[in-house]
Amino acid sequence: MTLIVNTTADAPSGAGPYSQAVRAGDFLFLSGIGSLDVDTHEILGTTAAEQLRITMEHIKAILAAHDATLANVVKMGLYLQDPDDYEEANAAYAEYFTPPFPARLSIGAGQVWEMKVKLDCIAYLGT
């Protein structure tokens, strides 16, 4: 199997030895991403909802680099620094999807970074 990696300048690049996204067959796996400024990598947004919306725009940009949209997403991961932000983040998340919704894992990750929200996803690019 050949792994295909496309990157976009419209979303932050990885800060470590990983890709924004990797396509394996008909599946596209997006790495964990947050609300970072694409140029400075500073955290944008002060609330969980603001950070989630910024992150979703980054995800849309990465998907677009692979000729995909949120309609191709089959699985999302929502990682919250503080589980008390769940309702706020969930309400913002609901702005991006309509039924049938992708599968999702939501956890209070207690991350060590300052971001309130991180997301990752898997998209299906087949027919």
Image (cartoon, rainbow, N blue to C red):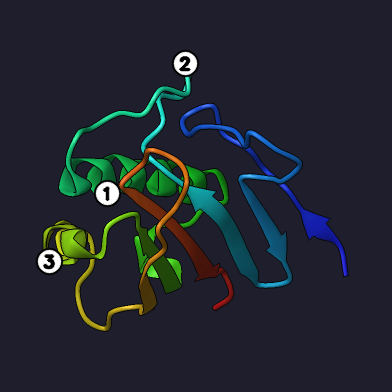
Q: Residues within 10 Å of mark 1 (few under 14, many from 20)?
A: many
Label 3 to label 2, Cα distance in Å?
29 Å
The residue sitting at 52% across, 53% down in the picture is 32
| Above or below, comparing residue 89 to residue 62 in the picture | below
The residue sitting at 58% across, 75% down in the picture is 126
Which residue in the structure is indicated by mark 1?
A: 52
Give the label on residue 39, or none. none
Which quarter of the image is occupied by the N terminus?
Answer: bottom right
Q: Residues within 10 Å of mark 3 (few under 14, many from 20)?
A: few
Label 2 to label 1, Cα distance in Å?
18 Å
| Above or below, comparing residue 21 to residue 109 in the picture | above
First in sequence: mark 1 vs mark 3: 1
Return the x and y of residue 12 as percentages of the image width and height.
Answer: 51, 32
Q: Nearer the viewer, residue 26 or 17?
A: 17
The residue sitting at 46% across, 30% down in the picture is 10
Q: Amino acid at mark 3?
A: Glu
Give the label on residue 87, or none. 3
Return the x and y of residue 70 as percentages of the image width and height.
Answer: 36, 61
SS type, badge 3: helix
The part of the image, by quadrant, that contains residue 30 is bottom right
Label 1 to label 3, Cα distance in Å?
12 Å
Q: Amino acid at mark 1?
A: Leu
Q: Nearer the viewer, residue 111 or 26?
A: 111
Q: Nearer the viewer, residue 54 or 70?
A: 54
Question: Can you tell which of label 1 and label 3 is closer to the viewer?
Answer: 3
SS type, badge 1: helix
Which quarter of the image is occupied by the C terminus?
Answer: bottom right
